Image: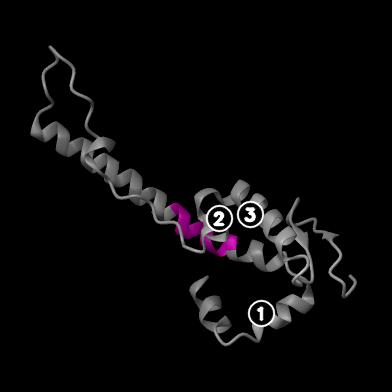
Amino acid sequence: MSAKGENNASAELGSAISVQLTLTNYVKWLEAAQSTCQERFGYQASVLRTNVAYIEPFVVAEDYTPPAVDGVPQLTAVRLATLRDKAEERRLSSISAMKKESPKFYSCLMKSFSVGSTVIIKKHVDFVAAELASC
């Protein structure tokens, strides 16, 4: 790979590119990384766009309470509690699945960098903490 940051197709990442990041090609790399990671990791990849980690929304009444319909009796408190519990279980299951995918997401990003960019990243003062957090 050249030092000018020309793109190299990466068999591991499919459409993502393995590049030496520079000011001139960062935007192109980011667009490819966003697209590839969004396809593979869904909401978790929104961090590449927003710079804020995705948080699974908390369960609210609209998630488990059916809309009121004239002539249809309201659900009992016990039934509503059961529906809320099931909604909470789905949320926790989603969080658990996302946590299991986090190391794969991190690895996908790291594999998209060239050797030169990886060396620069690994020299960063926060790299060790980030590496430990990704496990």
Q: Is residue 35 visible?
A: yes
In this image, 16 relative to 47: left or right? right
Q: Is mark 3 on a helix, strand or loop?
A: helix
Question: In the rendered image, which residue does mark 3 sit on?
Answer: 34
Mark earlier in primary sequence (1, 3): 3
Name the quadrant containing residue 69: top left
Q: Quadrant of the N terminus?
A: bottom right
Q: What residue type is labelled 1?
A: Ile
At which x and y percent is residue 7? 84, 61
Question: In the rendered image, which residue does mark 1 sit on?
Answer: 121
Question: In the rendered image, which residue does mark 2 sit on?
Answer: 45
- Residue 7 is covered by the magenta coloring: no
Over which residues does the magenta segment extend? 97-105
Between 64 and 53, the residue placed more toward the observer is 53
Disc 2 + disc 3, Cβ < 8 Å: yes
In this image, 39 relative to 75: left or right? right
Q: Which residue lies furthest to the top in this view?
A: 71
